[in-house]
Image (cartoon, helix red, strand yellow):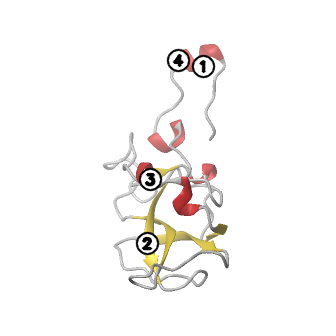
Amino acid sequence: MSSLITEDEISHETELVWLEDIGPLDYVRQSLDRLPTRKSRPAYHRDGRMVGYALLGPTAKASRASGTFRRRVFWLLPHDRDSQPVGLYAKSAPAEAVDPRTLEPRVKGYKTERSEGGPPSSAMRQLGITLPL
């Protein structure tokens, strides 16, 4: 889950690689996967599709036990909002989802009104408060 990713786990990231335009995406799911390399495109073994992944710098250390690196992978499932706008996540988002516009190397990202599927509340509009979209 996104909320369980800590800043120190992603501190060796140097770049995020997007495999498609994230402009129309309200959210992406993110996870830390164990991968054999710091930089190459990871294999993808989930339903749905991989949207992006992180590259690690040369100081990232492999696990002593497995020899793998923990890297973020960004993905979507077939029932996510981009494919089913009025489906399960029409007015919410999965626990591991974040707004892709809030992601950067070494920044875990966060949910926004857009990623949660709703417009700003009337109180926020009256106060002129907006969250990143």
Answer yes or no: do the residues labelled 3 and 1 have beta carbons within 8 Å? no
Tell me if mark 2 has few (under 14), some (14-19) or many (20+) residues whose alpha carbon lies within 10 angstroms of its own. some
N-terminal of the pair, mark 3 or mark 1, is: 3
Q: Would you name the residue on which mark 2 appears?
A: 33
Distance between the Cα atoms at labels 3 and 4? 28 Å
N-terminal of the pair, mark 2 or mark 3, is: 3
Tell me if mark 3 has few (under 14), some (14-19) or many (20+) residues whose alpha carbon lies within 10 angstroms of its own. some
Badge 4 marks a residue whose secondary structure is: helix
Answer yes or no: do the residues labelled 2 and 3 have beta carbons within 8 Å? no
Task: Give the foreground label among 3 and 1.
Answer: 3
Q: Is residue 31 above or below residue 107?
A: below
Distance between the Cα atoms at labels 4 and 1? 5 Å
Q: Would you name the residue on which mark 3 appears?
A: 2
116 sits to left or right of 128: left
Kind of residue sitting beneath label 2: Asp
Q: Would you name the residue on which mark 1 appears?
A: 125
